[in-house]
Image: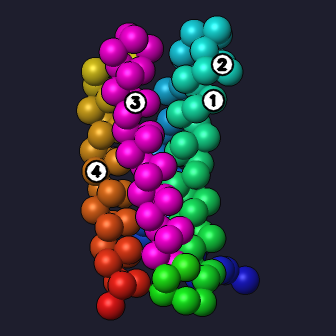
Amino acid sequence: MKYAFEKLEVWQKSRVLVKEIYSVTKSFPADERFGLTSQLRRAAVSISSNIAEGSTRLSSRDKSRFYEIAYGSLIETINQLILSADLQFLNPDDLTKLRVQTDEVSRMLLALHKSTNR
């Protein structure tokens, strides 16, 4: 059985983003394991988690709130990616690739949020 959120393209794309972030953070310094590495991974996981949870809510208001939280986590992720590049933990090419992915998830998430507020 598939749940409704599994059919959402934005959820699928957010999962790909999580996998990419886990991949790039493997090369972060060991002393960042409980710092930026953990923060970045948690923020990225929060995006897909809140999309999934929001999709199960019955009221538009509840759905909308979870999609807002997912968007906040996306912005947090982008900020942490920029900081990672500033600290030279993340190379510019990886940042560019991840920014393309986050921009796509952002557009889709905003459209999903907008669809709940009709």
Q: Which image quadrant: the C terminus?
A: bottom left
How far is the residue under mark 2 from the one under mark 1?
6 Å
Q: Which residues are magenta?
A: 63-89
Which residue matches tag 3?
A: 81
Q: Are marks 3 and 2 in contact (CB under 8 Å)?
A: no
User: Image check: 43 left or right of 97?
Assistant: right
At a point 28% along the width and 21% down the height, the residue shown is 92
Mark 4 crowdedness (10 Å alpha carbons): few <14, some 14-19, many ≥20: some
Amino acid type, label 2: Arg
Which residue matches tag 4?
A: 103
Q: Which mark is residue 4?
A: none
- Residue 40, image x, y percentages: 53, 33
Amino acid type, label 3: Leu
Which residue matches tag 1?
A: 38
Location of residue 2 (image quadrant): bottom right
- Residue 39, image x, y percentages: 58, 32
Q: Earlier in the sequence, mark 1 or mark 3?
A: 1
Q: Earlier in the sequence, mark 3 or mark 2?
A: 2
Q: Are marks 1 and 3 in contact (CB under 8 Å)?
A: no
